Image (cartoon, rainbow, N blue to C red):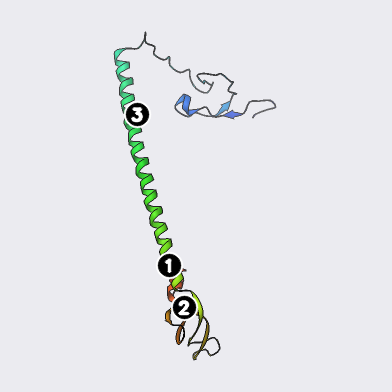
Amino acid sequence: MTGPGAAPAVPCSLAALHHPHTAHPWEPQPGMDPVHCPGHPTPPDRHTADTITDDALDELYQQIDTLEGVATRAEQLATELRTTAITHQQRADTAEAAVARVRQLHRPVEGLGRDSDDNPGGYGLINQACTTCGTPDELAVPWPCDTIRALNDEHPS
């Protein structure tokens, strides 16, 4: 707005005018059809059945054919994208399920092994030992094991 009560600067509808132009103060009113604003020159007169020439009609049919081709290709691309998205989602779900199964195999339990909690560098009880790596009741591997560290994107020891 430039002053009290002035209309806001509003861009015109691209749907009606088909190309943008500088915003300017104006207020569209209900029932303005077709929309026309002072920032755009007067639109050319539309052809009627009485005024259209054969060449102009041929041009309109060519535009329709072109737009139908574009719409068909857009529908094909949308279908391809949906199919690709579904495939990627299925692969992600499969990978997440596999990671969950690996985590279930490599969960923490109490165990006996080297580098125990009460005897660093020696043999004894490990409060957090991996259920899969080593043997929890005699040669336990401290948890998180290298597998869990890799899943957590940590560098294995």
Q: Residues within 10 Å of mark 3 (few under 14, many from 20)?
A: few
Disc 2 designates what residue?
130
Q: Secondary structure at mark 1?
A: helix
The percent position of residue 98, horizontal first and vertical second, equals 40, 64
Kind of residue at disc 2: Cys
| Residue type highlighted by circle 1 | Arg
Q: Is residue 90 above or below residue 118?
A: above
Earlier residue among tags 1 and 2: 1
Query: Helix, strand, or loop for circle 3?
Result: helix
Q: Nearer the viewer, mark 2 or mark 3?
A: 2
Query: Is any atom of residue 109 visible in this view?
Result: yes
Going 44% across and 26% down the picture, which residue do you hit?
18
N-term mark: 1 or 3: 3
Q: Which residue is mark 3?
A: 67
Counting residues from the start of the chain, the first of labels 2 and 3 encountered is 3
Give the Cα separation between the discs numbered 1 and 3: 51 Å
Residue shown at 35%/12% (left/top)? 52
Q: Position of residue 75 (x, y in %)?
A: 36, 37
- Residue sitting nearer the eye, 152 or 13: 152
**Furthest residue toward front:** 137
In front: label 1 or label 3: 1
Query: Label 1, on which residue?
Result: 101
- Toward the top, the furthest residue is 50
Disc 1 to disc 3: CB gap under 8 Å: no
Residue 103, by quadrant, is: bottom left
The percent position of residue 104, horizontal first and vertical second, equals 46, 70
